[in-house]
Image: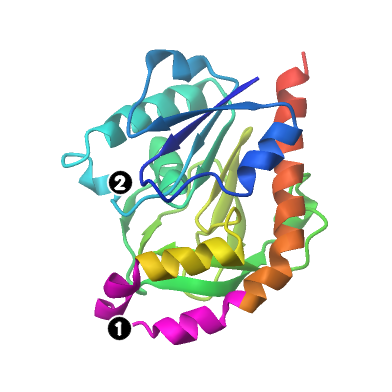
Amino acid sequence: MRAVVFEHEEHEGPGLLEPALEAAGFTLVRRFRTVRREDVDAPLVVVMGGPMGVYEADAHPFLNDELALLGERLANDRACVGVCLGAQLLAAAAGAQVSPGKNGFEVGVGPVRWTPEALKDPVVAGVKPRTAVAHWHGDTYTPVPGATLLASTDRYTQQAFRLGQSYGFQFHLELTAKELGRWLELGAEDLLTRGKDLEDLKAQLPRLKAAEAENTALLGRLAHALARGLRTP
């Protein structure tokens, strides 16, 4: 089974999601800021993050192509997974509005609260009510029409959702503590201009390391649930 992965930055790959998908029987096909027509019929499409906003599609035309593809897939209930920018694109394709968040930039390691509906979800069920995850976003989106809200934080309510067979995660379940540490180094200058304390952010990494097994297990359930759905007649 093909899983087409849309990437927008060289260092923002599928991370822990890649081995999870491969273990579930998927073969990853990676695209960088490009869409092919045949991707609309792929068994699975995964859209990763990036620094651009959904509302900046005029400057980044590939976002319009991804939005159109996601909209067509959602209309036919074809499975998609969105991470960070990918979740925002998935939300926009479903009719939500994406905009800069009024509560500021959310970055570092922090908990998400799973909703009661999430704790009954076949993918999420089994997690603790609060999970430590990596955050790196300043945009948010309005409630997704027809979707089930799965997770929130104190800063932003819209953090994860399920819509049909598709899932959107505003946060980064795919990041290990080591990889988030690399992101912090790569983004150090930007973080400083935003008033963030780099050493404080690095001090949070052990919390992500401690949650790695739980987050990996969740990604494994996600991948296998998507695979089972595709194999169901």
Relative to residue 232, is residue 186 depicted above or below?
below
Residue 105: image x %, image y %? 36, 71
Label 1, residues with CA under 10 Å away: few <14, some 14-19, many ≥20: few
Q: Which residue is mark 2?
A: 54
Q: Residue at x 46, y 52 (%)?
A: 84
Residues marked 1 and 2 touching at CB (< 8 Å): no
Relative to residue 117, is residue 168 depicted above or below?
above
- Residue at the right extreme of this rendering: 126
Q: Amino acid under label 2?
A: Val
Residue closer to the observer: 173 or 126: 173
Relative to residue 229, is residue 57 depicted above or below?
below
Q: Residue at x 50, y 69 (%)?
A: 181
Left/right placement of residue 222 relative to residue 144 reads: right
Residue closer to the observer: 185 or 141: 185
Q: Nearer the viewer, mark 1 or mark 2?
A: 1
Q: Tag 2's secondary structure?
A: helix
Residue closer to the observer: 83 or 152: 83
What is the span of residues highlighted in magenta in the rendered image?
187-205
Q: Is residue 100 visible?
A: yes
Q: Which residue is mark 1?
A: 195
Residue 210: image x %, image y %? 72, 72
Q: Earlier in the sequence, mark 1 or mark 2?
A: 2
Q: Residue at x 53, y 61 (%)?
A: 179
Left/right placement of residue 51 relative to residue 151 reads: left
Magenta span dominant secondary structure: helix
**The N terminus sits in image quarter:** top right
Q: Amino acid under label 1?
A: Gly
Residue 120: image x %, image y %? 79, 52
Residue 145: image x %, image y %? 48, 42
